[in-house]
Image (cartoon, helix red, strand yellow):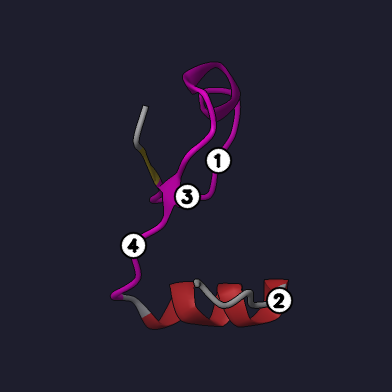
Amino acid sequence: MIPEIDQNAFAARLAEGGSLVVDVREAREYRPGHVPGATTCR
């Protein structure tokens, strides 16, 4: 199970570096907007 974190903790982890964000939404949802630096698995 992957633990949930809140928005502030997420932003802090991104700022620290070394995190990988994988956006699992469909490509049509990813293209208009996503977390900067995120990659898509679609």
Q: Nearer the viewer, mark 1 or mark 2?
A: 2
For image coordinates 70% across by 71% down, the residue present is 7
Position of 34 with respect to 17 (left or right) is: right
Say which residue label 4 marks: 20
Which callout, 1 or 2, points at the residue further toward the start of the chain? 2
Of residues 6 and 14, the one drawn nearer to the viewer in this rendering: 6
Tell me, for residue 34, which label it has, or none: 1
For image coordinates 60% across by 24% down, the residue present is 29
Looking at this rendering, what residue extends furthest in the top direction? 28
Which callout, 4 or 3, points at the residue further toward the start of the chain? 4
Tag 3: amino acid = Pro
Tag 2: amino acid = Asp
For image coordinates 48% across by 39% down, the residue present is 24
Label 3 with label 1: CB-CB less than 8 Å: yes
Which callout, 1 or 4, points at the residue further toward the start of the chain? 4
Looking at this rendering, what residue extends furthest in the front direction? 1
Position of 17 with respect to 28 (left or right) is: left
Q: Categorize mark 4 by other alpha carbons within 10 Å: few (<14), some (14-19), many (20+).
A: few
Quadrant of the image occupied by residue 39: top left
For image coordinates 64% across by 77% down, the residue present is 5
Say which residue label 2 marks: 6
Q: Categorize mark 3 by other alpha carbons within 10 Å: few (<14), some (14-19), many (20+).
A: few
